[in-house]
Image: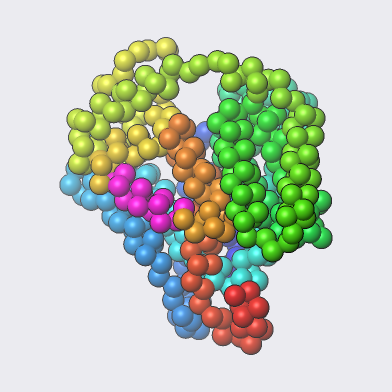
Amino acid sequence: MDDKLSVAVLVCLVFAILTAWIGEPWPSYCLYAIVFGIGVTWLLGRLLQPMPLRMSPLVWILSAIVAWGMGQLLLGLTVNRWQTMNAVLFWLANTVLFFLSNQLFSNSVRRDRFLKRLLWLGLIVALTAVFQLFTAEGKIFWLFRTPYSGFIMGPFPYHNHFAAFVVLILPIALNVSVRDRGRQLSYGLIVGALAAAVVASASRSGAALVGLEIAAGLIMTFRRTAASLQQRMGRIMVLICLIAVSGTIAGWDVLWERFHHGDSVRLRLAESSVEMVRSAPWIGSGLGTWPSAYPMYAHFDDGLFANQAHSDWLQWPAEGGIPFALALLGFGVAISIPAVRSIWAIGVPVVLIQCFIDYPLQKPAIAAVFFVLAGALAAQRSPVRPRSPQSDAAAVCRH
């Protein structure tokens, strides 16, 4: 049953990604229903066939985050109950995804199969996004017009969110490319294609972070690979050349031009967010309520609706108080150390870095991929030995 549930988790991510462009709330509710349905199915399966239960300490941190939001609702410590209820559902779904991933992907064979499928999903989305950017005239999937403008990348109306998705997926291919000589070229091409898609999207933060994670992955691999210095340098140079050529095809000029433009709006939003934290440092305004609380602290009005703080690390303490942000910081630090060592999950801490200057984890699609990968990483760190002889053999070979 776990194999089927792992496919269900992938289907869940496909739904979240393909509906990321829809501004209505129903895709989020459908996503939550799917997640909770998979969770109930897993629970019923464990009642019928008991198996060892994994309880990562990180699950308790996420559970505390959900409890914090529920406490705000029960005590009336929110400026908008409806937004806080939606935020509680959001964090509960993320917690369930992390828990399910932690249970399902302790089996290394199942985990590797899932990551490979997720990588192919990411590649298809990225290639589609590039072709759509140049040929769809602003329509999503060449069919649907949206009120958004700019660099619309596949199902992501905001190019920085597309970049965050690629940041999470790319290290899976990078890990294979630099470690497996037999698949270096094919997976190196995938890395180049994903990096080129971020270049085409003209996301400044995305391009910088992709470069950061590729550099970190190459450094970590260089130190660990048993091959000779000449072989290691050769693999790295091949990969760098593939990325450079792919980026040239996508076009560096627009991205380079955007690096010469400042963004004063983010600074003003950050100032307002800091004031929100100061006004309620311990309890916040209520999870999910930043858009409702912001007008009281606004420093300017450009006629546009400010939907997010454009910095998750400022929005979290503004909504949940400093304890809420510290809990997420603890989660981030705990998951980042093994992520860097794994290479394939290095996108997890890199997205947390992006959260300083943007809001990727406010979006259900990005958050879903993030917490599934984080759960799989936590499962890899201390796997439970499977019961079947075949799985036992695979686990022994792996470790």
Taking the image as shown, residue 220 lies to the left or right of residue 129, namely left
Magenta highlight on residue 335: yes
Asked if one can make out residue 277 in the rendered structure from this viewpoint, the answer is: yes
What quarter of the picture does the N terminus occupy?
bottom right
Name the one closer to the observer, 236 or 147: 236
Asked if one can make out residue 177 in the rendered structure from this viewpoint, the answer is: no
Q: Residue at x 50, y 77 (%)?
A: 384
Q: Residue at x 58, y 40 (%)?
A: 212
Q: Position of residue 368 (x, y in %)?
A: 52, 50
Q: Position of residue 349 (x, y in %)?
A: 49, 47
Q: Is residue 216 above or below residue 391?
A: above
Tally of numbered tags: 0
Q: Residue furthest bottom?
A: 389
Image quadrant of residue 215? top right
Q: Residue at x 37, y 12 (%)?
A: 301
Q: Position of residue 362 (x, y in %)?
A: 45, 40
Q: Is residue 11 above or below residue 297?
A: below
Range of residues picked out in magenta: 324-336
Q: Is residue 23 above or below residue 223?
A: above
Q: Residue at x 26, y 29 (%)?
A: 276
Majority secondary structure in the magenta region: helix
Magenta highlight on residue 129: no
Name the one closer to the observer, 283 or 215: 215
Its colouring scheme is rainbow
